[in-house]
Amino acid sequence: MSMDAADADARRDDLLSTLEVIEEQPLAERANAYAALHDELARRLESGPRDASA
């Protein structure tokens, strides 16, 4: 497995773990946790490499 694939697998596992923790919380806390996760993922997307052909 390449480093890129291993890194993607690790990020996927981290995301799944985060989602499992969020799902165990009471509804009001869950909503706030999903909002925070959304903000974090949006920041990651914005800071990622840009496709010059897009």
Image (spheres, grey):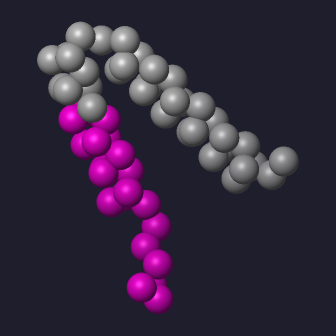
Q: Quadrant of residue 11?
A: top right
The magenta span reads 35-54
Q: Who is closer to the viewer here, 26 or 47? A: 26
* Placement of 16 over or under 40, stated as above or below: above
Residue 27 highlighted magenta (yes or no): no
| Front-most of residues 36 and 31 | 31
Relative to 48, residue 24 above or below: above
Note whether 25 is above or below 16 in the view shown: above
Q: Residue at x 38, y 50 (%)?
A: 44
Q: Spot the residue most to the left.
A: 28
Return the residue found at the far right: 1
Instruction: Say which quarter of the image contains residue 38.
Output: top left
Q: x, y (%) of residue 22?
A: 35, 20
Q: Nearer the viewer, residue 24 or 9?
A: 24
Is 28 located above or below residue 40 in the figure?
above
Residue at 35% across / 46% down in the picture? 41
Horizontal side, residue 22 vs residue 15: left or right? left
- Give the side of residue 51 with respect to residue 33, left or right: right
Residue pictured at 44% horizontal, 25% vertical: 18
Q: Could you tell me what secondary structure mostly forms the magenta stretch?
A: helix
Residue depicted at x 45% and y 20%: 20
In percent of width and height, residue 12 lies at 57, 39
